[in-house]
Image (tube, rainbow, N blue to C red):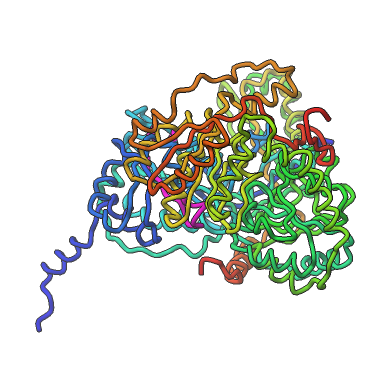
Amino acid sequence: MTAPSKEFMEMKQKAMQITGAEAVIRSLLEEGVETIFGYPGGAIMPVYDALYDFDKQVRHILTRHEQGAVHAAQGYARVTGDVGVCFATSGPGATNLITGIADAMIDSTPLVCITGQVASPLLGTDAFQESDVVGISMPVTKWNYQITTPEEIPTAIAQAFYIARSGRPGPVVLDLTKDAQFGKVDFTYKRCEKIRSYVPEYPLDKESLKSAADLINSAKKPFLLFGQGVVLSGAERELQEFIEKAGIPAAGTLLGLSALDSEHELNTGMLGMHGNYGPNIKTNECDVLIAVGMRFDDRVTGDVKRYARQAKVIHLEIDPSEINKIIKADVAVLGDAKKSLRMLTRLVKKQEHTDWVNEFHQAADIENEKVIQKDLFPVKPGLTMGEVVRMSSELTNNQSVVVADVGQNQMAAARYSKFSKTRSHISSGGLGTMGFGLPAAIGAKIGAPDREVVAFVGDGGLQMTIQELGTIAQENLPVKLVVLNNHFLGMVRQWQQLFFERRYSFTEMVNPDFVKIAEGFGIPGKQVTTREELKVAMKEMIDNPGPFLLDVLVEKEDNIFPMVPTGASVSDILLSAEE
Amino acid sequence: MKEEFIISAYSENHIGLLNRITIIFTRRKVNIESLTVSESALSGISKFTIVVREERSRVENIVKQIEKQVDVLKAYFHTNEEMIFQEIALYKVPTQALMESDQIERMVRKHNARILEITKDYTVIEKTGHKEETQELFEGLNKFGVLQFIRSGRVAITRSANERLSEFLAERDALLASIEMKSN
């Protein structure tokens, strides 16, 4: 056989050259991306054109607004643990992503957002749909980068995925000029394995682990707080083994909730402003406080000057900037939660703290009598958010993925859902983004197609992203949407009632008929107002193979309790408005 | 209590990184008193020197946030006493004033300043030193009418024997190699 001719080699070389746009898609495939959420537009059209040939390998979900795309990508990332990917065009497309990116930043959600940008010669000329996306997204991204040549695409995407998913995860924005999409490149892909200026996690420090173990071994009243870091590092089993061996009662942050089975005997519930009574008051009674993968958010701590002052604090954390940021750690253990917990379990003695755990049970009894029974078995005819949530939890055997919007609905969903699997609770924690719930549920359903996904949204938040019903309809996604409808911006109204002398300034809402709206999108729905109707309709919703909207008219002026008012100490938690 | 700190950071020489670093201050409403960025002893690595007046705990927090940026290699902070630092100032005075008396010449000698350029209209004087020193010369010269004045940001080095940036990079390589990543 003769050697291939020079012309043939040149031809072959040319054949391996692909457009930057195609390089984007091929790079995403190299990273294992199966789903992209997005919305096309002028400056990202070459990428969309390339995507057209890859519909067998990658699924693109066309949302109805870029904010929907980014929240869906977040829901997908949170339920799967993979990087959520979204596309948007330049200018308004990119700026519409910002809320979701900020949300992902504060809640450590791995995202890669690829935005189109005007051609590089037009940068800085106020070209049509030009905006400074790198500048705008800088404060709310873990990393961002503008790509202006096709050659940069594979490396930039490889770095973007590495940065988004490693260490403390977060969102990355790649701003891709149109000429970089049109240009040709010889495509080769290599995954990024390290970046010299970036230490995703520190190796375990045996000394600090030993100090932590010593404190735990001599503790009489140890208490463990678990945050989303446990979920992000996949340390659920390690957490359980650790608390079981050391006999330590534990409580979760809002984002950590599903890391530990709700029915586990050492799971004492949720921390924070509307968390459970026991975990809040016991924070100020424990002698050793072990915080794992959490950042002492002000909604968890209340007044920091009166937070766990009596306790020695052990902080297991991957991000060095979280150490001593809010609460000074007596022992800081830097590193991945899974590795730290595994090592710590080896170092601690097998113990039981029966009396101490019983104190949590007693606190739980008090909360049960004063709050929970009233929420779950109300004497009034009006429906409570709590009973709706609990019914859903029971009908799905505590197996569903619970997505919540923000506000009273979110707190009811967190308080009254029970979780038996990790990555089952998806909610906007740090940013508190109303409108998150519906699109996040879309992403969650796509990420976990075999699981029941139930989203609890308020009538306010629903109307912020209601157009995403169109996405549900187009993709025929069996998302179950429960509207906890009180015709109010409920949490703001609650604060107005408690702290602003019932001056209900612009919180009452005149709502459309949500069932009719859903019907307009081809989504079946029901409105219920009574307990009898609720049970029937919720069964119908769960049994329905497709999407369903259940509009539950709940008590208009119910409040979420317990409550740690802003500025109060966690131990001053209120069980009712009368206190 | 607020005091003056010198924040130093080594970073990759990437577009936009200056903005990434300064917004950390902006977000916390902390004023930057002076800022110098230039290439370090190693090609491709920039050095930031940032002077702030703040409480120590806030500075600690800010430095951690700077170091958290993906493209930043290392950040740390020092008090003024812990570092040797200088600023440079340029003064433009009318040459006429120099001709009329020897007072400017005396000032230049006294302050260890030097003359960079003389034209028939103006003379440019350069002085390096701490801010108080360059300010003192400014006030002296201004009796004769300073036409233009400019002061640089601070540059500073530690009192340790050498910079050890290349050793740091070697240590960093070893650190990164030692981490068994969950993605692997």
Residue A368 among those drawn in magenta: no
Asked whether residue B22 is in view, the answer is no
Is the residue A360 above or below the residue A211 in the image? above
Q: Is residue A87 magenta?
A: yes
**Where residue A348 appears, x then y in whole percent?**
80, 71
Is B162 drawn above or below residue A486 in the view shown? Answer: below
Q: Which residues are magenta?
A: A76-96
**Residue at point 33%, 36% (across, down):** A522
Q: Residue furthest bottom?
A: A1
Q: Residue furthest front?
A: A532
**Image quarter for residue A210?**
bottom right
Q: Position of residue A351 (x, y in %)?
A: 83, 70
- Measured as percent of width and height from the top left, residue B9 is found at 64, 49
Q: Is residue A459 left or right of residue A320?
A: left
Q: Is residue A138 left or right of residue A312?
A: left
Viewer-side residue, A218 vs A442: A442
Image quarter in which the N terminus of chain B is found:
top right
Residue A161 or A368: which is nearer the viewer?
Answer: A368
Residue A346 seen: yes
* Residue B135 horizontal side relative to residue A2, left or right: right
Residue A339 coordinates in the image, percent (x, y): 66, 68
Residue A293 figure quarter: bottom right
| Residue under the image location 39 percent in, 28 percent down | A516
Question: How many numbered discs?
Answer: 0
Query: Which of A143 and B11 lies nearest the eye of the viewer?
Result: A143
